[in-house]
Amino acid sequence: MLNKKVSDLLNQQINKELYSAYLYLDMNNYFQSRGLNGFANWYMIQAQEERDHAMLFYQYMQNNDCTVTLDAIAKPDKTFTSDMEVLKEGLAHEEYVTSLINDIYAAAYEVKDFRTMQFLDWFIKEQGEEETNARDMITKMELFGNDPKSLYMLNQELAGRTYSAPSLVLD
Ligand code: FEO
């Protein structure tokens, strides 16, 4: 059995990842209404990845004989007023998720739960990539977002993002 604090945090992370999916769906919704379907595509794939993350925590708990409790998912309550605001919210959210993953890792470390630490290694790396992606989006928007032709090209580039299943597979 996993330590209670560790399993509580893992359980909470299922909800946080599902909320992340909700938040990115909301961002998809914003960009659809702006007519920027490439940006919308990018956030739709992001939402799918968050659902995958939630399922990895879900499965890890089940694999370790922990009972999962499914809580209500919070409503994304931001009203976005600019494209850049969405992008910056995305980065801030990923930094927050990184802090949550670090908290679980710290709890596992405290009780020498090496199995959970090893499981979380994938998420530590993933969070680094997610933050980099979010920062790249902001940089590109700062460079090209004010010119309609460049924004069109950027939108085309983001339309090319395709989904791939997570590289972490649990038995
Ligand atoms: Fe599941 Fe974007 O962190």
Image (tube, rainbow, N blue to C red):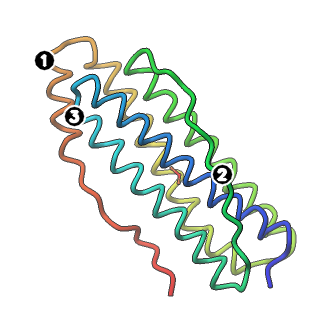
Task: Residue 104 in the image: state x and y as whole percent.
Answer: 74, 61
- Discs 1/3, front: 3
Which one is earlier in the sequence, the residue at label 2 or at label 1?
A: 2
Q: Residue 2's quadrant in the figure?
A: bottom right
Nearest the eye: 71 or 49: 71
Q: Are marks 1 and 3 in contact (CB under 8 Å)?
A: no
Task: Find numbered disc 1 in the image and state the secondary structure of the residue it sits on.
Answer: helix
Mark 2 and mark 3: Cα distance apart in space: 30 Å
Mark 2 is on which residue type? Ala
Mark 3 is on which residue type? Asn
Which one is earlier in the sequence, the residue at label 2 or at label 3?
A: 3
Task: Residue 58 in the image: state x and y as whole percent.
Answer: 60, 71
Task: Find numbered disc 2 in the image and state the secondary structure of the residue it sits on.
Answer: loop
Nearest the eye: 116 or 13: 13
Q: Say which residue appears at 58% left-offset and 59% top-offset.
A: 124
**Residue annotated with mark 3:** 37
Q: Residues within 10 Å of mark 2 (few under 14, many from 20)?
A: few
Which label number is shown at residue 149? Answer: 1
- Discs 2/3, front: 2
Q: How many marks?
A: 3
| Left-right relation of 106 to 130 | right
Mark 1 and mark 3: Cα distance apart in space: 15 Å
Mark 1 is on which residue type? Lys
Against 60, residue 50 (above or below) is above
